[in-house]
Every structure is written in structure tokens, then in C-alpha cells.
Image (tube, rainbow, N blue to C red):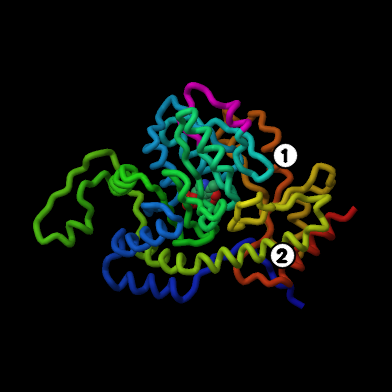
Amino acid sequence: MLMKKIPIAKPFLGNEEAQAAYDTILTGWVTQGPKVAEFEERFAEYVGAKHAVALSNCTTALHLCMLLAGVEEGDEVICPSMSFIATANSIRYVGAKPVFAEVGEDFNLCLEDTKKKITDKTKAILLVHQLGMPADIESFTAFCKDKNIVLIEDAACAIGSDIEGKRIGSHSDLVCFSLHPRKIITTGDGGMITTSNDAYNEKLRLLRQHGMSVNDRKRHESKKVIFETYDVLGYNYRMTDIQGAVGVEQLKKLDTIVTERRRIAYWYHDKLAELEDKIRLPRERKGIKSNYQSYQITLLDHVEQTVPDIMQAMLDKGISTRRGVMLAHKEPAYTSDNNLDLPHTHKMNTRSMILPLYLGMTEEDVDRICNELKSHLKG
Ligand SMILES: Cc1ncc(COP(=O)(O)O)c(C=O)c1O
């Protein structure tokens, strides 16, 4: 009998998104326009922020946040090494130095270690809500306020996660989301910044479109001839209207997606509970809700098996898994940081792996994955 393959992830897209893209193409307006504006409005409303500014991806969103925070050459920004490389790269884009701090058991930045890394050059902290699990935003906000440091949130994975019912995106004024297909909702590629700061909102709209004083849509609709000026050094970080239209449809499904992902994560919690003497499960702290963008487990110290061995054994049985979140400081692009001493981060990275989680998975799929994992963790 043919073995059913279980992938690691699948975007949840359907006829609604296809129709929306089709309809938008036929309007003849395909670059940033009314659909992007509608997507932004709905996104802001969903997270509970005053504004949402759509961008080409989360990496460009992070870059613009660095500019708004006034981060420049000679400054330091503290962030976790355990994150997708774009987190640290965004700091380097403005000539500043990423200073890597340890993560805690939830894979999020550790406040105690962050405190040790503060210098008189620290301009900002880039707090990642890793894999959709909300970081301790309250403590970081209080700390940053006290030290007069800017807080930027990398919420690439965290749309739909919340803390005591308050959604990620509404806690601070520079929050960046990703709409890559590996995330909770997608526009192919795409990014969003949420803010309740009017000045930031205006500046972001200028920066994402070449620093242009009057955008192309306004000129197109104007009854009078108007000329634009280019007031600041800007970028082309726009989202297309085709993507905006897809985003509007994805947002309509977001509650369903998050509810379903949480249901699958809780199947994992239940079925793997008997292994908690061997692995740590990604359980939520009291009062917080993860969207479970990924389900990452960690092998405890005394477990002899290695992550690559288990991953290979599972792949041989048709089950895709992924290594735990990468470490930026170990990459060739970060040679001068390669030997940094981050023991906990390093251990978490070598001992972690991600299990499949996507809409359409059945409880039988989860059973099969858990049984396979159990069989490799015997003894
Ligand atoms: C934590 C984190 N930050 C930033 C990014 C970059 O997102 P994008 O691909 O939308 O640029 C990712 C993407 O994987 C991510 O996981």
C-alpha cells in the first residue's frame, strides 16, 4: 500500500483567493491601490491597532522600522540569534550591530540576558514572537521605557496570537508581520506593520513608495494636474493589489485558521503528554494564546537520540519535519559572531525539531506522527 506523505506545512488557500486575484487583474489596477487599502483597514481592525501599512514582505517591514526608530551606524540592537536570519539582517541594513542575547524555554528573548547586553550604544530591542508564541511583551515594554530604548516587535509568525485577549500587533507602535506562505495567512509574499502612531503611519507610507509626496493612485484619480516631489530617500517596498485582494480573503478565514491550528496543537499536547519525561512541548504560559505557527518540540538532555536521526527516520516513513529555528550567529554571513557564547540558545537549537501542522490534517495523521516519534524515543 502507498504510504501517505505528510508535509511539514500547507497554506490554506481556496477559490475565494483565486477569484479575488482574478477580479483584481481584470480591473486593470494591479499595483498598490484600493485592495491594499482595504486589506490594511481590515488588518488594523483585526489586531486592534489604529493603522496597518502593507509592504512587500516582513524583511522590508523590519528595515523600515529600524529607520523609524532612528537606528543607525554605530548603534546596537539586541535580538535573539535564534530567529530567521532576516531578524538580524534588518539591523545590519542600517549599518547597526545586532547584539545577540539568549532565548528562554519558549524560544523567545530572555529579559535577564538582554539586560546584561545593554550598553550605551543600545538603541533598540527587536523582540521576536517566535513561531507564534507571544513573548513577554509587558516586561520588555516596561524595561524599554525605563531605559529609553525603542521596542520593535518581529511578529512575522504571530498574527492571531494574543496575550490576555489583546492581540499581537496592538501592544506597541512598530510591529512587523510576514505573509509568506509558511505563515498563518499568506499573500504569496507580503508584510505588514501595525502602529497606533499617526506620525509613524505617515512616514511609513512615504518610505514604502520612493518618498513620493503624492502617490500614483491619487494622481490617477485627480481631476487636476498634480506633480509629485520626492521628499526623503524612499524605497519600493509596495505590496501589489493582487496580493491585497488575496489578503482580504485570507483575513476572513483567519479565525477559522487559528482555531483549527490550536485544535491540532492540542492533539499533539495530549498525545505526546506521556513523553514529557523525554521531550518538552510548546505549552502556552498562563493567559497567552499561540496561533501555533509551528509545533516545535525539544529533546531533553538525557535523551540519547539526535534530532537529525529522528528526522531521517520519520522522513523514511513519509513524515516531513524540520530542524529547530536557525541561529543567525552561526552563519557564514556572521563570521565575526560565529564563536559567541550562547550556550542555552545553542542547546535549544541542536535539540529542537518542528512537527507537521497545517489545516486539513486529521487526528489520524497526528496519531501516526506521534506514534512514529514515540517509537524512536524508546529506551
Ligand atoms: C521571525 C521572522 N522574522 C522575519 C521573517 C522574514 O519574513 P519575510 O519572508 O516575509 O521577509 C521571518 C520569515 O520566516 C521570520 O520567521
Q: Quadrant of residue 108?
A: top right
Against 91, residue 211 (above or below) is below
Instruction: Please tell me which residue lies in front, 291 or 227.
Output: 291
Residue 124 inside the magenta-drawn segment = yes
- Residues at marks 1 and 2, CA–CA distance in whole angstroms: 27 Å
Q: Of tags 1 and 2, which is closer to the observer?
A: 2
Would residue 235 be seen by someone viewing this image from the given angle? no
Residue, x 70% and y 51% (percent of image)? 353
Which residue is under mark 2? 267
Which residue is under mark 1? 347
Q: Are marks 1 and 2 in contact (CB under 8 Å)?
A: no
Range covered by the magenta-colored residues: 112-125
SS under mark 1? helix
Q: Residue furthest left?
A: 224
Residue 212 inside the magenta-drawn segment = no
Residue, x 73% and y 48% (percent of image)? 298
Position of 319 with respect to 133 (left or right) is right
Residue 110: % across, % down: 62, 36
Residue 351: % across, % down: 74, 45
Tell me the amino acid under the disc marked 1: Lys
Q: Residues within 10 Å of mark 2 (few under 14, many from 20)?
A: some
Tell me the amino acid under the disc marked 2: Trp
Residue, x 50% and y 43% (percent of image)? 86
Residue, x 46% and y 56% (percent of image)? 47
Q: Quadrant of residue 100?
A: top right
Residue 50: % across, % down: 37, 52
Against 189, residue 136 (above or below) is above
Q: Quadrant of the N terminus?
A: bottom right
